Image (spheres, helix red, strand yellow):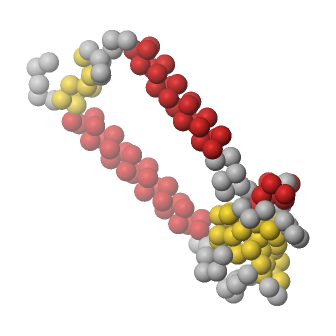
Amino acid sequence: MFSNRFYFLKLFTAAALVWLACYYNYRQHWGFNPAFWRCQAAPQDYHGAKLWIVHVVVSKILPDGVVISTPGKDHHIEARGQVPPVAVGDPVSFLCTFRRQGSYLDITPGTFHVMRHYSLKRAVMEVASILVFIFALILLLTSYENKVHGGIFVPKGTSR
């Protein structure tokens, strides 16, 4: 299985399986968690759709909710429901349901989160991921010979 025999057949089979999985997901889940601007463009198709809104910015505070916009401020939509104290410009995330009458988002109770320090947390996560990758690469390079024999890595200390 891990040899170079029938290499192109194995490569083609793997690529075909990945393509089929992507195509299946596209056909089965095309409406899963759509962007809110897509819901606004075709409200009749997305009425009642569940959305997970991540890293949007509060652009206006209303008595029964907030108006949110994408970070580039290209798209705006009203989100109604229980909202903790927020300020204009705060990044937020929440779960909601799209309603076509009035084209607004109905916030799921208890899911509204203010993410004031999101950028710092994201940077720390990225650095941690890079360090894990470097550590795994060092382990791989120190555990195996740097040359490949017959299409497989050879562990150090073997005469293969």
Percent from the top left, x then y, of residue 147? 27, 21
Residue at left 68%, top 63%?
51
Residue 83 in view of the camera: yes
Residues 92 and 83: in front is 83
Q: Give the quadrant of the C terminus.
A: top left
Q: Give the answer, above or below, for where 33 lies relative to 159.
A: below
Furthest-right residue in view?
Answer: 102
Residue at left 74%, top 65%?
48
Furthest-top residue in view?
Answer: 5
Q: Is residue 117 left or right of residue 56?
A: left
Q: Give the answer, above or below, for where 70 lies relative to 108.
A: above
Residues 26 and 145: in front is 26
Q: Is residue 137 left or right of residue 91?
A: left
Q: Give the quadrant of the N terminus.
A: top left
Q: Give the answer, above or below, for where 12 lies relative to 69.
A: above
Could you say which quadrant of the image residue 120 lies in? Answer: bottom right
Q: Is residue 110 left or right of residue 124?
A: right
Residue at left 63%, top 44%?
28
Percent from the top left, x then y, of residue 86? 71, 83
Residue 37 in view of the camera: no
Percent from the top left, x then y, of residue 63? 82, 88
Percent from the top left, x then y, of residue 43? 84, 59
Could you say which quadrant of the image residue 56 lies in? Answer: bottom right
Residue at left 30%, top 41%?
138
The number of numbered discs placed on residues in the rendered structure image is 0
Q: Is residue 114 left or right of residue 81?
A: left
Residues 121 and 64: in front is 64
